[in-house]
Amino acid sequence: MNRLLIPTVLASLLCAGSASAQFYSEAACVLFEDGNFRGRSLEMGPDDSVNFRGGQFWNDRVSSVLIRRGCTLVAYEDSGMRGRSIELDRRVRDFGGSAWNDRISSAECYCDQY
């Protein structure tokens, strides 16, 4: 009976480890080039930040965002986490018509659950 117990415990530990690894590999915040979560996307993990400078593709190009439950995205109008900011804890299907459409130049993503 002990011969079966040890492999079973090891298998359980390996499976639990891979499930938790999958959880950590999922994007916490996703920035999209176009509204309705379309176009090119940029995935961010928990505690990630991005800083776009003039001339870089993503600078002033974000039009929608997905934010995982338990996570927050802080977006800034200027690079270097400066300028006006907005704190989001839910998805935004389309920034169009708002002051934030195509205005994000840096952002931070953080999560409570990670």
Image (cartoon, helix red, strand yellow):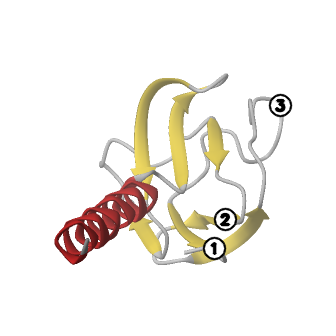
The circle drawn on residue 15 is none
Q: Of marks 3 and 2, which one's residue comes earlier in the chain? A: 2
Which quarter of the figure has residue 9?
A: bottom left
Q: What SS does tag 2 mark? A: strand
Q: Of marks 3 and 1, which one's residue comes earlier in the chain? A: 3
Residue 57 vs residue 6: left or right?
right
Q: Residues within 10 Å of mark 1 (few under 14, many from 20)?
A: few
Query: Relative to 75, does residue 38 appear above or below in the rendering?
Result: above
Q: Inspect the image, locate mark 3, and give the three-letter code of the amino acid beneath it.
A: Gly
Most extreme residue toward the right is 97
Look at mark 1 in the image and give the residue it sits on: 113
Q: Of marks 1 and 2, which one's residue comes earlier in the chain? A: 2
Tell me the residue at 43%/71% (across/down).
48
Q: Are marks 1 and 2 in contact (CB under 8 Å)?
A: yes
Which quarter of the figure has residue 45?
A: bottom left
Look at mark 2 in the image and give the residue it sits on: 71
Q: Position of residue 42 (x, y in %)?
A: 40, 44
Nearer-the-camera pick, 26 or 72: 26
Look at mark 3 in the image and give the residue it sits on: 97
Q: Residues within 10 Å of mark 3 (few under 14, many from 20)?
A: few
Tell me the residue at 55%/41% (across/down).
62
Q: Residues within 10 Å of mark 2 (few under 14, many from 20)?
A: many
Residue mark closest to the camera, 3 vs 2: 2
Q: Are marks 3 and 2 in contact (CB under 8 Å)?
A: no
Quadrant including the N terminus: bottom left
Q: Inspect the image, locate mark 1, and give the three-letter code of the amino acid beneath it.
A: Gln
Q: What SS does tag 1 mark? A: loop
CA gap, disc 3 to disc 2? 25 Å
